[in-house]
Image: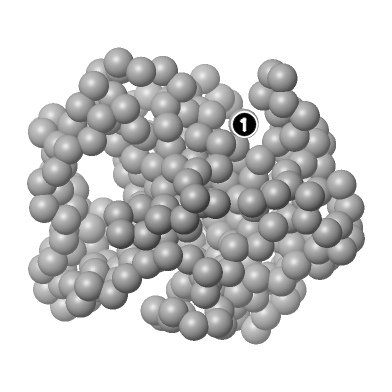
Amino acid sequence: MSSTASTTLSPLYPDVKLVPRLNTERGGADHGWLKTFHTFSFAGYWDPRYMSFGNLRVINEDRVEPSEGFGTHGHREMEIFSYVVSGELEHKDSIGNLEILKRGDIQLTSAGTGIRHSEYSRNNKSTVHFLQIWAEPHTRGLKPKYFTRHFTDEEKTDKLVTVVAPIGSEDVNEEREGSGPAPVQSNVTLESTILSPGKSVEHIFPAPASGETRRKGYVHVIQTSGYNTGTAKGSRVRINGGLELSEGDGSFAWAATGDKLHIENVGATPAEVLVFDVE
């Protein structure tokens, strides 16, 4: 995976390098009870080109059948967050949390020195569709913590809303349930938007990490119109006036301070898009 992709993919901001990660290229499997896609190497999918991106380690797009789920298992030294698209996701963990998460909810587990949890689709009529995201922490040996946040569709419509951000960032607080972005012990920020046809938003890249010349970003278009392992379809967006992505597609980005990701909905239906900013 190179940061020297053709600038014809980004004519509005030619210094921004884009490398698409198409839906058909993602790893994944259909286990019956679980239909999953993997942006990075995970479980039975392994590709040395896609092990991580900065401290971003996992982007899994999962659909879990009613009354099925991930049994109790352990994590340590990882920041794990779930972005619920539809359905109901039950989270239960070893530090006393039990919660049903629904559309618009963000749940973040800072695993620290170790935590055990389970995740189930407890609605017996509908599948739960969510993105499971892992980021490597910047500090090890922390006490496990749990946070939830909620963002309505109205809040995200035609606006780029920060839903996860590093502790110490603007508007971030460490309340278990509160306003503002969920706090993460990692140098990764997640923004979300629901773009109407013809509308656009922009992400402005901050300064890269000390010693680095470029900032990293990743754009993902959520598969809101249904499970599809083939060529991406459904809602469609254009990045920086060039690269076009549909549901399930994504793109890596490298940029300097002040460069932009201009995301425009060029399709006929609303597009739900995630933007990761990685130091």
Instruction: Say few, some or many: other residues with alpha carbon within 10 Å of mark 1 (under 14 / 14 to 19 / 20 or more).
Output: many
Judging by the rendered image, the residue that carries numbered circle 1 is: 279
Q: Please state which amino acid type lies under the numbered disc 1.
A: Glu
- Regarding mark 1 in the picture, which secondary structure is present there? loop
Horizontal arrangement in the rendering, residue 58 relative to residue 29 (left or right): right
* Residue 62 in which image quadrant: bottom left
Residue 22 appearing in the image: yes
Residue at coordinates 55% horizontally, 52% vertically from top-left? 49
* Residue 217 in which image quadrant: top right
Residue 194 appearing in the image: no
Q: Is residue 17 above or below residue 142?
A: below
Q: Is residue 246 above or below residue 45?
A: below
Q: Nearer the viewer, residue 130 or 182?
A: 130
Marker count (numbered): 1
Q: Is residue 35 above or below residue 20?
A: below
Residue 252: percent from left, percent from top = 64, 52
Residue at coordinates 69% horizontally, 18% vertically from top-left? 210
